[in-house]
Image: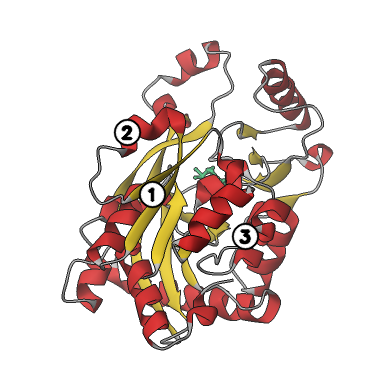
Amino acid sequence: MTAIATLGSHCALQVLKGAKDEGLRTLLVCEKKREKLYKRFPFIDELVLVDSFVEVLDPRCQRTLEENDAVIIPHGTLIAQMSSEQIESIKNPIFGNKWILRWESDREKKEELMREASLPMPQKVSSPSEIDKLVIVKRQGAAGGKGYFMAASEEDYHKKRNDLISQGIISADEPLYIQAYAAGVLAYLQYFYSPIKEELEFFGVDQRHESDIEGLARIPSEQQMKNNKVPSFNVIGNSPLVLRESLLDEVYTMGEKFVEAAKRRVAPGMNGPFCIEGVYDENAKFTSFEFSARIVAGTNIYMDGSPYYSLLYNEQMSMGKRIAREIKNAKDLNHLDKITT
Ligand code: AMP
C-alpha cells in the first residue's frame, strides 16, 4: 500500500489527515523535540524520529520510506532547511516536480520563470545605488519573510542592512534581492495542476499575517519613527480571502500561463499544488512578487475544504486530501511516474 510521508512542520497535519481520509498510510519525519506535539494526532501512523530534518538524506530514513512505499510531499520547511542539491539527491519519490523547487529558491531563476509566464512583476532594482523609490529587500529561499526590510534610499538600505547583520539576522555575505514595493491588497492564489486530468484547479486565496510589519499599522507614525528596530515580514499565520468574482477569469489565466511556462522550462512542469503571490492595486491590477512551487501553508485554513473547491467537489476537499486523491488516481492508472519525480 502506498504511504504518504512529510516533514513535521508547515502543513504536515493537513497533508497527513488528507492522506488518512483517502485511506493511505501516513508517516511523519519528526524532530524529537516535536514528538509530543505530533503524537496528539491519531491519523499519523508512524513517526520517524530525527534530530534534524537533513537526516531524510540518511540511508536509515530513506530505507524506512522505501519499505513503506512512501511518496514524500515537499513543503516550505524542506526548502528552507535543505539545499536544492540535497533535495534533488533524495531517492524516494517526491510528489510534484522536485527540479522546480530550485527555481523557487533561487531569486534569479524565479524571476526568469515568472517572466516566461508573463506574470506582471514589480521592477527589479539591480543595485542599492539605484534605489529611487520604496523597495523591499529580500533574502534567498523560503525564509518566510524574516530579515526582509523596506528601504527608500541607498543610505536607508545600508543602515538597515547593517542593523540586521549586527543583530545576526542576516549575514554579511548574503546576496540580497531588491524589488520595487507593490502596495495594495495582498493575495496568495492557491492552485492545483493535475497532469493526470491535464486540468488546472483554483483552490483558494489566503492572506498572510506578518510580524512586525502588520503591527506597525497600530502605532501612530510619530511613534513608529522612535522605534529603532527594522520591521520584519515574519509570517505568523494566515487567514482566508475570497475575491471579487470578476477577478477569477484572470486568476485562472495566470495559473494556466504559469503551468505552460513550467512545462517549457522545467520538465515535467508544475504538477500538483502551487501558489502565485502578489498584490491587487487600486485598479484591481495584480502584481506578482513570488511563487511557491509546492503546497503553501496558507492552504491550512481550508482543512475542511475551500469555497472554490466546494464548487468543484461535492465533498469536503482540503489540499492535503486532493494530493492524496491524485496519488491514488495515478496509482490506479499505473502512472505514479507522471506525478512524482
Ligand atoms: P516573499 O518571500 O516574496 O513571499 O515575501 C514575504 C512578504 O514580503 C510577502 O508576504 C509580502 O508581505 C512582502 N512582499 C514581498 N515582495 C513584496 C513587494 N514587491 N511589494 C510589497 N510587499 C512585498
- The residue that disc 1 covers is 12
- Image coords of residue 282 (percent x, y): 43, 55
- Residue at horizontal 61 percent and vertical 64 percent from the top: 98
Label 1 or label 3, whichever comes before in sequence order: 1
Label 1 or label 2, whichever comes before in sequence order: 1
- Left or right: where 137 falls relative to 247: right
Q: Secondary structure at mark 3?
A: helix
Question: From the viewer's perspective, is residue 325 above or below residue 88?
Answer: below
Label 1 to label 2: alpha-carbon separation: 12 Å
- Left or right: where 151 falls relative to 174: left
Q: Quadrant of ligand 1?
A: top right
Q: Are marks 1 and 3 in contact (CB under 8 Å)?
A: no
Q: Nearer the viewer, mark 1 or mark 2?
A: 2
- Left or right: where 177 falls relative to 315: right
Q: Are marks 1 and 2 in contact (CB under 8 Å)?
A: no
Identity of the amino acid at label 2?
A: Leu
Label 2 or label 3, whichever comes before in sequence order: 2
- Residue at horizontal 83 percent and vertical 37 percent from the top: 129
Q: Secondary structure at mark 1?
A: helix
Q: Secondary structure at mark 2?
A: helix
Label 2 to label 3: alpha-carbon separation: 28 Å
- The residue that disc 2 covers is 37
- Image coords of residue 229 (percent x, y): 57, 17
Identity of the amino acid at label 1?
A: Ala
Mark 3: few, some, or many residues within 10 Å (few <14, many ≥20)?
Answer: many
Mark 2: few, some, or many residues within 10 Å (few <14, many ≥20)?
Answer: few
Residue 282 visible in the picture: no
- Residue at horizontal 23 percent and vertical 46 percent from the top: 42
As drawn, the label of residue 101 is: 3
